[in-house]
Amino acid sequence: MRPARLTGSGSPGAALAAGDPVVLVAHGSRDPRAAEATRALARAVRAARPGLAVWASWLDHTDPGPAAVLRSLAAAGHPRAVVVPLLLTAAYHRRVDIPAAVAAARESGPPIDVRVADVLGPAGGAADEALLAGLLRRLAEAGPGRFDALVLAAAGTRDARARASVGRVAAALGAELGVPCKVSYASAAPPLAGAAVARLRAAGARRVAVSAYFLAPGLFHDAVLAQAGHAGAVAVAGPLADAPELADLVLRRVDAAPSG
């Protein structure tokens, strides 16, 4: 199979002197805003560490895929690369899709040693301080003033361990702000954002805000905006996208990625 033509950070060969290239792997969406958010994050990571070669890839809907990027890097002479899953939970895509893409690149292209980093959400322990700082930034941007309860709106998963990791983020965010923080999901698990906001208001909260546990805009975030607004939320944060704290978190994952 012919390697994909890369357009992310110069040419693959020119990046040889800059160290191991980084391949960001996003879920992918039919919504073009999501791909642009991934590209913006790649630019932010490059800006945070000048000289680092950073490529964006997607598991679905948008090209190139991670296997194609890895093949092209190997063909350009890179012996190693680091893959960073742009995922907030370590569910199916991290456990199955990303390892499959790495295996496909190794099987059908020149040899390349690939280190796969942890997801951006808590993989087993506490939420990273950079992740919390990015969520706090987006909340502050959503509107001034205090609130007395918070909903952390996530995409949703049937994986119980992944849901538990979202719960840890909600608990840490609530503790940071000194308010109760409940989880909602846009799919796969209840409650929806509107229902979570309504429950907090019924329990006595007057000003409920929503923190968006999303990396990019799209249909899920649009639905959260509509539901939360209808239920009386005073503010709904934007996705993390290219927040500087998220770029810092990506670099932390790059530095901590285990040997392949």
Image (cartoon, rainbow, N blue to C red):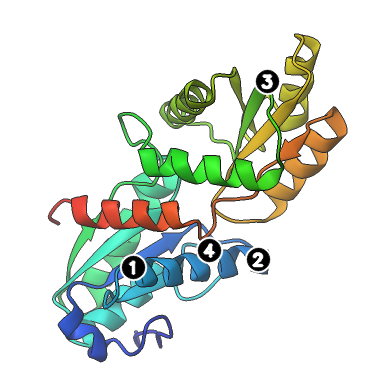
Circle nearer the N terminus (2, 4): 2
Q: Is residue 244 above or below residue 9?
A: above
Of tags 2 and 4, the one toward the viewer is 2
Q: Residue at x 24, y 63 (%)?
A: 82
Pick whichever of labels 2 and 1 is earlier in the sequence: 1
Residue 155 at least partly seen: yes
The dot on residue 148 is 3
Residue 204: give x, y in percent of width and height.
Answer: 77, 10
Count of labels in the image: 4
Between residues 50 and 42, which one lies in front from this camera angle?
Answer: 50
Check the image and report above or below for 70 versus 201: below
**Element assignment for label 1:** strand
Mark 3 vs 1, N-terminal side: 1
SS category of the residue bearing label 4: loop
| Residue toward you, 212 or 57 | 212
Secondary structure, mark 3, is loop
Q: Check whether the beta carbons of the residues at disc 2 and disc 3 lie within 8 A of each other.
A: no
Which kind of residue does numbered mark 4 sit on?
Answer: Asp
Residues under labels 4 and 3: Cα distance?
Answer: 39 Å
User: From mark 2 to mark 4, how far is it between C-alphas?
Assistant: 14 Å
